[in-house]
Amino acid sequence: MSMTTVHRIHNFSAGPAVLPLPVLEEIQRDLLALPGVGMSIVEISHRSSTFETILARADADIRTLANVPSNYRVLFLQGGASLQFSMVPMNLLPAGAIADYIDGGSWADKAIAEARKVGRVQVAASTRAESYRRIPLQSELQLSRDAAYVHMTSNNTIEGTEYKQLPDVGDAPLVSDTSSNMFSGPIDVRRHALIYAGAQKNMGPAGLTVVIIREDLLHRAAEKKSSLPTMLNYGTYAENRSLYNTPPVFAVYALGLVMKWLIGEGGLPAIGARNERKAAKLYAEIDRTGFYRGTAAVPDRSRMNVTFRLATEELENRFIAESEAEGLDGLKGHRAVGGMRASIYNAFPEAGVDALVGFMKDFERRHG
Ligand code: PMP
């Protein structure tokens, strides 16, 4: 039962984004003192057994949820997914080697720019010339022989496209930026060498990045121990169970609650089915008459970020202003692409999708 009497609007933000209400209520309930501890989560030492248990439980719940094999480590870092754009090549790209990058969206483009500062990069395929409206095809991939790794972005937050099937990269280690669709459905960890994601979309508050890394890649990081700054070496986090220095204590705690919520909701298959249903409702409305125009190629449409446009920018501005007035917040598309974007991550309620569909029908009646 909800203890909250405050009015909550429908929050379509791309991130930080809506969190599950039961999680917020638990945080609120325990904010002054964790049960049996007598201190708040934002006051306790990261060296306390209370926090060590919270961190270990978050780690264990991530493993349970995603079936993380025992030869992978879960690391908790800071610096956002953006720092991973640098850490991935710094740790995994030896001098003289080459890394392949699949350029399927604006965030991939940023990852490429950072990797180029570190070492040799080959762009294996790019849909930039098509404004990233689709995911590069398997047949377009030009993979290097012996690439140190292949980097991809599983969901393009800005353009609203998503991989439906992982690319086949042969024996090369696959590194994936899953920031905007982490744990939105089943994920085959085994087919990846490294997965990273900022927490602030599907997993918790901002300030925390989750990295799942296959242990053999830690050997590459170990070789860089004397040259890389300590805080930029994955080995530091692996060797110290993410407690080398002070981790973002509150964010780890909140992420743990979200993982517990996900497990309670039936795990990734159940949440995946719900996300499919939510997105299908929205795309059905977009496609219904032609008044709205989906911007992503249909087979690659994201279940997380639904992007669409109207005939004129004036109409789009009106859509955003009127939807805001109705308590539908955050529908303005990323400034780089314009139009509208509805981000409907795990915790976004189906009732909010229904409210948006209702608003879209009404808006079309009035302006179509
Ligand atoms: N990659 C993707 C796919 C993203 O959506 C974002 C953030 N929107 C980032 C990377 C950057 O994340 P951060 O802000 O955590 O650095």
Image: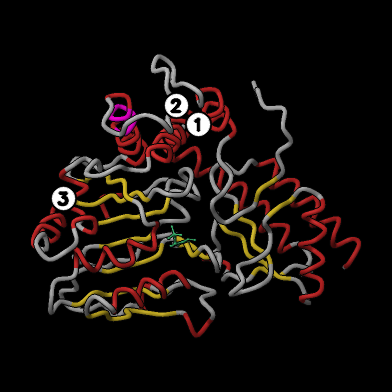
The span from disc 3 to disc 2 (Cα, nearest Å) is 35 Å
Residue beneath the point at 36% across and 66% down? 152
Q: Residues within 10 Å of mark 1 (few under 14, many from 20)?
A: few
Could you tell me which secondary element the residue under label 1 belongs to? loop
What amino acid is at disc 1? Answer: Glu
Instruction: Report the mark closest to the observer, 3 or 2.
Output: 2
**In this rendering, position of residue 332 left or right of residue 38:** right
Quarter for ligand 1?
A: bottom left
Image coordinates of residue 115 in percent, x first then y, are 29, 74
Image coordinates of residue 206 in percent, x first then y, are 47, 49
What amino acid is at disc 2? Answer: Ser
**In this rendering, position of residue 167 left or right of residue 296:** left
Q: Are marks 2 and 1 in contact (CB under 8 Å)?
A: no
Which sits in the foreground, 174 or 36?
Answer: 36
Which sits in the foreground, 221 or 71?
Answer: 221
**Any mark on residue 40, and which?**
2
Magenta-colored span: 51-55
Badge 3 or badge 2: first in the primary sequence: 2
Q: Quadrant of residue 291?
A: bottom right
**In this rendering, position of residue 309 left or right of residue 264:** right
Instruction: Report the mark closest to the observer, 1 or 3.
Output: 3
Q: Residues within 10 Å of mark 3 (few under 14, many from 20)?
A: some
Q: Is residue 202 above or below residue 256?
A: below
Q: Is residue 344 above or below residue 347?
A: below
**Any mark on residue 265, and which?**
1
Badge 1 or badge 3: first in the primary sequence: 3
What amino acid is at disc 3? Answer: Glu
**Any mark on residue 215, and which?**
3
